[in-house]
Amino acid sequence: MMTSVTQELDTLLEPLTPEQREELLLKPLEERLRSLAKMLEISDNEALERVSKACNIPFVEKWAMHENPEGCIPLRLIHEYQCLPIEQEGDDAGLHLIAPWPPTTLMSEWVYAVTGKKPQWHLGNPNFIAKKITESFGVGASSLRESEIDELIESEAEGMSAEDENAAIIRFVNEIVTQAIKDRATDIHFEPQKETLKIRYRIDGELVPVSLPQDLVRYQGAIISRLKIMARLNISEKRRPQDGRITFEAAGESLDIRMSTLPTMYGESVSLRLLSQKGQPLTIQELGFLPQDEAMVGRTLQRPHGIILVTGPTGSGKSTTLTAFIRQINTPGRRIITVEDPVEYEVEGINQTQVRHEIGLNFATVLRTVLRQDPDVIMVGEIRDRETAEIAIRASLTGHLVLSTLHTNDAPGALTRLIDMEIEPFLVASSVEMIIAQRLVRRLCQNCKQKASFEPGFLETSLAALNIDPNEAQFKDMLFDPGGCDACRGLGFRGRVAISEILRVTEDIHELIVHKDSARLIREKAVAEGMRTLQQCGWEQCKRGTTSLTEIMKFADIIDTL
């Protein structure tokens, strides 16, 4: 039977090129269906139906996992084959397994060898199967269990040897990082607690707990040590914080991982920042700028000189925005040089330099050298001190377009921050062309978003808190709330979009800067001249169905306090 399945599957794959077939069959089982759908340019559901029909394996849309899955099949096989035992009415004695891809002969033989039952296979939604496995057993559960297959076949395993345990820890850490990549996480946090080791991913700016094996605390020390070995840190030093870097390869993708350790009451806390070396930078359109803002930014980027600043707290997408700007103006006629810490996106056709503080190669040092390289455009990762600010301003006044970031609360605050760095006000006013203050809000999942419903008076109160005209409540039918589906892991959100306020340094604002007026006065003047605030931009994104009102309400208290 399994031979015929293979033959039928080969027939289904005939439209693919040999390269596509090889690429497809090298992918993990849970990813093959989606890849096939993409290659054939059909929907995932249609691909599932074709595979089911071709291989004569029934597709089951709604199913229930067996109450004792580990009693039916070893956990190691559940993870390796991405299959689950399911309940089937009228056949209590049979072994019914649901899988995301047609099984091979070897898979069936292994199941029969360790269970003594011939499996009856069914096909199911890959996303739902993977989600159920993770929820039920935790990420990396099979790596930390004893070798169940060896136990069943050899009946002599009484526990893991030191070598087995080390290998299990390595597999577990790799699975944690690989799962984080699949979930589009930007950070992984290992947090020792009194009786457990908690692991959380940061996805779309929010911390999400990871389902883990119950006995994970037993391996806490080994897991932390493994991470420190990967980052080439001192594993015996547990009293002081340490920083390191890891190069991680997974699914054909290379990651630069920044690692930081911190001693706590119950062990070392570890934070990993995931930076894809092949990450595809976004375009200005993909950032989510409103059309009028996009046009304003585009005009300013065409200027031959001046400074454009992007401000916001850590994690607000400043570097991503600058990279999008660089891509927009990257033409053969412009020489562009960047100074970054670290280089997050590789952009073809530009010169990218990474600072190295350990050898004294900081922003200011590199920037001086860059000015001797005949650049047209310079991107500085961050203006952190007076020296860097002075060089950046001097560069802008000598015919260079300078792009950089500042850590300030809002756009007007960037001007006063530069003056606080002891930069002469007239230099600030003469060099700065535009300041963009931005935040990232979660984007509603387009598969499951639903019409918003509000308690009486809630919308009006929210608009008042956002300092938005109460008459805008008439657009309530255009608003959406998050739902929850497999595509977004039940969160109702998938991805993020930028909301921003854009301040142009006009003649009137130029005068306020020269006279060292407060950021509040600058803000009032900018709003009077038409600047859209962060809250107003967020409300516009709500009306476009991009995000929800609850997301925007997180920034209701953003006001100028300088």
Image (spheres, rainbow, N blue to C red):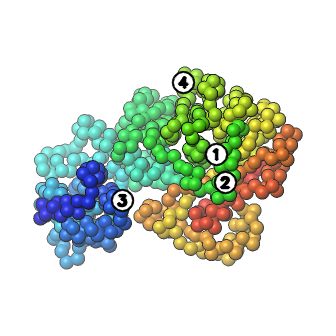
Q: Secondary structure at mark 3?
A: helix
Q: Is residue 340 left or right of residue 154?
A: right
Q: Is residue 418 left or right of residue 251?
A: right
Relative image position of residue 561 (x, y in whole percent): 77, 48
Mark 2 and mark 1 lie on one chain; the one further toward the N terminus is 2
Is residue 518 among what the camera can see? no
What residue does disc 4 label? 358
Real-space Cα distance between discs 1 and 3?
38 Å
Q: Are marks 4 and 1 in contact (CB under 8 Å)?
A: no
Relative image position of residue 211 (x, y in whole percent): 40, 55
Question: Camera-side residue: 274 or 510?
Answer: 510
Which residue appears at 41% of the width and 64% of the height?
486
What residue does disc 1 label? 313
Mark 3 and mark 4 lie on one chain; the one further toward the N terminus is 3
What residue does disc 3 label? 38
Q: Secondary structure at mark 1?
A: loop
User: Given the current orientation, which residue lies at the most extreme top position?
Assistant: 359
Classify the position of the C terminus by image quarter: top right
